[in-house]
Image (cartoon, rainbow, N blue to C red):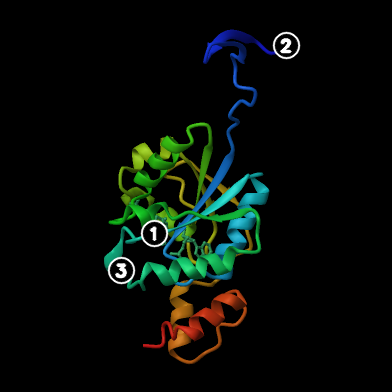
Amino acid sequence: MIATKSKTVSGVQVEVVEEPLIQKKGKKIGILGGTFNPPHIAHLLIAEQVGSQLGLDKVLFIPDFIPPHVDEKKTIPAEHRVEMVCLAIQDNPLFDLDLIEINRGGSSYSYDTVKELKQLHPENDYYFIIGGDMADYLPTWHRIDELVKMVQFVGVDRPKYQRQEQYPIIWVDVPKMDISSTKIRKNVKNGCSIRYQVPESVEKYIKEHRLYEQ
Ligand SMILES: Nc1ncnc2c1ncn2[C@@H]1O[C@H](COP(=O)(O)OP(=O)(O)OP(=O)(O)O)[C@@H](O)[C@H]1O
Ligand SMILES: O=C(O)c1ccc[n+]([C@@H]2O[C@H](COP(=O)([O-])O)[C@@H](O)[C@H]2O)c1
């Protein structure tokens, strides 16, 4: 039985539903933040595996604007990174691109991103996916003690890194891949093949725009 209430609208008496017919139902949303310089197959594989093993409704790929540890990395303009993420994820309905950090500008602190996402969708639960290297860095993250209460961190192993237990992390088993954007950039610079390390569309984009050649 749906509860209704009589109301007069423009002089006419109507019955209006008191409770929303469709309750806003929370979703399980994964977040894969990264510089994606460029996106590679390990990003896709970890997002797919975490999504399927934890039964997530979506995995958001969130390219950062300025990576928080910027001094350690040289990036290329966000437009290129965003375009390559679009190409990489386009055929997977589980994946979405979210430009929240690009639109916000400045240093892309995850605390700010998660806070904004939770304000927009308080009904959702968020799962922040990180590789073993990032799990090592967690203690240095901006407002980490608050952030760990707002999201569930999900770790995936990365060669040469041990599982860290300083903060609550769910570890998901994913085949370990010694693939990184750094190695891909080096390969391009040295004229070595990057085939099968990035999707074909991303490889084509890198060639067309002559990225990483210098
Ligand atoms: N091979 C991998 N195995 C597990 N996690 C990975 C792997 N590559 C990237 N990640 C994770 O994906 C997220 C985004 O990574 P990012 O875009 O910085 O790629 P990257 O390969 O680490 O880049 P770079 O070599 O430039 O540092 C991070 O949490 C990172 O730990
Ligand atoms: O918020 C922080 O302090 C923080 C510090 C380091 C990394 N992060 C986030 O972790 C994700 C992976 O970072 P990176 O540098 O490997 O591209 C990306 O979303 C970053 O914004 C966040």
Which dot marks residue 186?
none
Which dot marks residue 64?
1
Real-space Cα separation, disc 3 to disc 1, in angstroms: 14 Å
Which residue is rendered at x = 49% and y = 58% of the image?
Answer: 131
Q: Quadrant of residue 193?
A: bottom right
Q: Is residue 12 above or below residue 59?
A: above
Residue under pointer 3: 72
Which residue is rendered at x = 48% and y = 69% of the image?
Answer: 83
Q: Is residue 193 above or below residue 15?
A: below
- Dot 1: few (<14), some (14–19), or many (≥20) neighbours within 10 Å? many
Q: Quadrant of the N terminus?
A: top right
Q: Quadrant of residue 119?
A: top left
Amino acid carrying label 3: it is: Glu
Circle nearer the viewer, 3 or 2:
2
Q: Earlier in the sequence, mark 2 or mark 1?
A: 2
Real-space Cα separation, disc 3 to disc 2, in angstroms: 61 Å
Which residue is rendered at x = 39% and y = 59% of the image?
Answer: 64
Which residue is rendered at x = 28% and y = 56% of the image?
Answer: 106
Examine the rendering and report whether any part of residue 117 can be seen.
yes
Real-space Cα separation, disc 2 to disc 1, in angstroms: 48 Å
Mark 3 touching mark 1, by CB under 8 A?
no
Is the shortest distance between ligand 2 and the CB of mark 1 under 8 Å? yes
Residue under pointer 2: 1
State the image coordinates of residue 113 (x, y, percent, origin top left). Answer: 39, 46
Amino acid carrying label 2: it is: Met
Q: Secondary structure at mark 2?
A: loop
